[in-house]
Image (cartoon, rainbow, N blue to C red):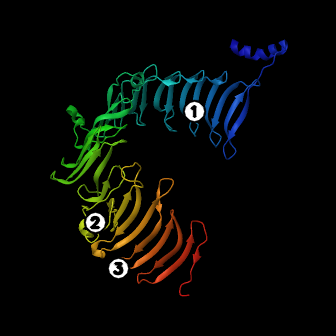
Amino acid sequence: MKFRYLLVFLPFLCSFLGCTVEHAEEQIIARHVNGVKKTSIWVYPDGTILKRNEWYNDGIKELEIPYDDSVPHGEFKRWTGFGDVAMIGHYKKGLRDGKWTSYFVDRLNSRKKEAERYYKDDHPVGDWIGWHYNGEKAFEEHYDDNGNPTGVWKKWHDNGVLAEEKYNCHDLTRSISGESPILGYIKRYGRNCKIIEHFKCSDDHLDGEYKKYYESYGPVDSIAGNCEQAQLKEEGLIDSEIDFGAHTTYRADGSLIKKIKSNYFKGREKIQWFDENNNVVRESNFITEETDGPTESSGISYGTCANSSTLFCAETSFVRSSWPSGTLDTCTLSYKDAFKQNIGKYPASLRYIKAGHVLLYEEFWAYDDPPTSYGDPALRVSRSFYPDSMGGKMASEGFWQRTLDGKSKPHGIWRNWYPSGILRDSLTYVNGERVGEQFSYDSTGKLTIHKTENGKNRPVIMHILGQ
């Protein structure tokens, strides 16, 4: 009551003593496209900021930040587009401080907590906790007084089942200080509590052994460690900084699909594929060569077809590089019997069959310089072939040239044929652009289009046929 009287009396006192009361005025510094104010600050005549506000484009206040000495200081508030509180926090001399609470956007259950987070000097501290909308715990995180992650972090599904457990996969302090990092792990689980992934980690990256499991569905079964029991899908070694990739994959019945042998110092050495009886059906061997420059490999790599672990739709030759190069003398694609008339007819570095296509595609890659020099190989020729059932003839042929930017672009004659062997079209490219005489024919061999092009966005001369 006395304070209220003082407020009433203060203006009279100031008038008697000759003092003035300064009021902060609102200054709009940004507007939405519809003209409604977006950002405004309240400023005293001397330039001191009292507070900053943000607004939605319908005029509802989005947030308010009080200021002291022109830096955020005091209680922060954010509202939803309906005017309900979405977050409450506190600033201390420009830095986040104390508890920050966020709320779900729900008109029926206002102030329903989504998470509680704590800060000191603007960095996270203490125990953070979050909830799902149904009230089940969603996550917990832990930080020491310096803002460093610590302890075991957890996430839960909205049915209360553990979804993720993480320990020491974010510890950067030891690597920075030179101390040996403490190994950690990440485990992820399905909604029925069955394990899905288990990775080991060091500092902030995956490092060491890992396992992946087939996800299963059904009732929760957490009795006597059953959550850790699941059908193995893949296991191996990983280092996200180097990724030398040794691993083995399995079918749902436990039989082998693929095994990759790799060495930290030599790189990838061998890839094997297996049928349902664990018999090797294809093997890629990589021969590592020690050179004056980087360690390079040569060999042949195979690629499986879509939705199959035993059919192979690609074959790539490697010579001194991870890029396709060299020559494939034979092809062991699963579909090779459909292309007996043309397999091995031309030098090729890469052969593949596209999903949903009937053609066999080949590419020939080569180095610009002699094999003893460095530099990536470039695409030189690309071809495609019809299967024997359609005549077995060439379907297309095009030539490429490396440009100054290091890319391969069409350069020279490009031709396409009908399955009967009749020419469909003959095109001329120069550095990726069609230049010169261009011809197209119908299936009988009759010329249908004849034009002269001079490059992209340049005039095209159409020739009138029959004259």
- The residue under the point 71% across, 36% down is 28
Q: Please tell me which of labels 2 and 3 falls first in the chain.
A: 2
Task: Name the residue beneath numbered marker 2.
Answer: 344
Task: Name the residue beneath numbered marker 3.
Answer: 420
Q: Nearer the viewer, mark 1 or mark 2?
A: 2
Q: Is the residue under label 3 in contact with that under label 1 (CB below 8 Å)?
A: no
Which disc, if any, is residue 78? Answer: 1
Q: Is residue 294 visible?
A: yes
Type of residue at label 3? Ser
Other-residue count near label 3 (Cα within 10 Å), few / some / many at <14 / 14–19 / ≥20: some
Name the foreground residue: 284 vs 39: 284
User: SS for tag 1?
Assistant: strand
Type of residue at label 1? Arg
Type of residue at label 2? Gly
Q: Position of residue 71 (x, y in %)?
A: 64, 24
Other-residue count near label 2 (Cα within 10 Å), few / some / many at <14 / 14–19 / ≥20: some
Spatial CA distance of label 2 from label 3 is 21 Å
Q: Position of residue 38 (x, y in %)?
A: 66, 39
Q: Nearer the viewer, mark 2 or mark 3?
A: 2
Q: Please tell me which of labels 1 and 2 falls first in the chain.
A: 1
Which residue, as the protein is rendered here, is positioned at the far bottom?
A: 467
Spatial CA distance of label 1 from label 3 is 71 Å
Which disc, if any, is residue 92? Answer: none
